[in-house]
Amino acid sequence: MWADALTKFGNAAGAVVVFVAVLLLIFFAAGRATGRVSKPLAVTIFLGPALLLLAVGLIVPAIRTITLSFYNDDSSKFLGGSNYTWVFTSSGEQQILLNTLLWIIVAPVVTTVLGLVLALLVDRLKHQGLYKAFIFMPMAISFVGASIIWKFVYNYRDPSQPQIGLLSQICLWLGWHNPPNWILSHPLNNFLLMVIMVWVQTGFAMVVLSAAIKAIPDEITEAAVLDGARGWRLFQYVTIPMIRNTLVVVLTTVMITTLKLFDIIRTMTGGNFGTQVLANEMYSQSFTEFNTGRGSALAVILFVAVLPLVGYNIVQLRRERATR
């Protein structure tokens, strides 16, 4: 056993050494090159590996996935657009699309609004860095870890037994003698799962929006105050317009994260009890049902849905940089 482990370790270390040696040799050759070939050679050496990895890791798999989406479960028969028709006409898949749409509307909006409120409130407190650190801390936890934490919060036991679920115990303390099984209660369970996403992402929204608010020039704020703007009017007519681009970027970033949602659903419910979403259904079709065609079609739909959000984010970031 130890001999096999040492052999594998030696092989891996040898491969790393060879890789580093080849890179050093290439860089040495590029550094020695002179004349008209030096610049094209340098560009090729530095961009070539990155473009190769991009092609192998992204472009080729994307083309293959699109191709497989037009075939049956074992890729032996061409079906045309049947897999896409199934996604949009099957009642079960329609419910999954609705669940996904609900997620990308509710969770990002609540996260952004809560992050903005916290940014405004915490910036008024002493030791604001400490409070921000605590609020941002869930960002350091993976979605799987956060899901396990909240699984204990939503844990259900018969009211006659000692409770380990925090939510059920609070309900009993408040006089609700028969709280439901939270994870099994549809559609409430979808919103309870969204709480996990909001809990993790709110710190990100707060930090980004807090930085945007602090970047508002003091001259603009002082001029608005001299004109009589106070409280809500100052927030409505000065703060919001000045951080509009940042708000959009935060909202769309959380939307992208939510659209790719997999970990929370997989850990909490496995997609059962009416909580299935697009990313988890893609995994289930590909690796549980072993239907490569339908899984690939769902992956393509997910990819196409993410593209506009990514493009819009890039445009907004460029506009924000241009204004600076």
Image (spheres, helix red, strand yellow):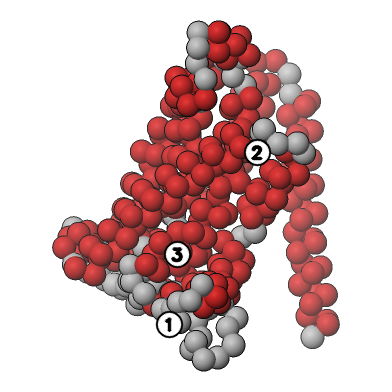
| Residue 301 higher or lower than 132, as above or below | below
Residue at (55% x, 49% y) in the render:
201
Find disc 1 in the rendering and name its residue: 178
Q: Residue 266's spot in the image, x, y percent? A: 47, 70
Q: Residue furthest bottom?
A: 160
Q: Does 321 sit left or right of 78 as displayed?
A: right
Residue at (70% x, 36% y) in the render:
125
Residue at (63% x, 52% y) in the render:
139
Earlier in the chain: of badge 1 and badge 3, it is 1
Q: Quadrant of residue 177?
A: bottom left
Q: Nearer the viewer, mark 1 or mark 3?
A: 1
Q: Quadrant of the N terminus?
A: bottom right
Q: Quadrant of the C terminus?
A: top right
Q: Under tag 3, what secondary structure? A: helix
Q: Under tag 1, what secondary structure? A: loop
Q: Label 2: few (<14), some or many (≥20) within 10 Å?
A: some
| Residue 290 higher or lower than 230, as above or below | below
Amino acid on which the number 1 mark rests in the picture: Asn
Residue at (51% x, 91% y) in the render:
160
Q: Residue 247's spot in the image, x, y percent? A: 48, 32
- In the drawing, what numbered circle is on residue 192? 3
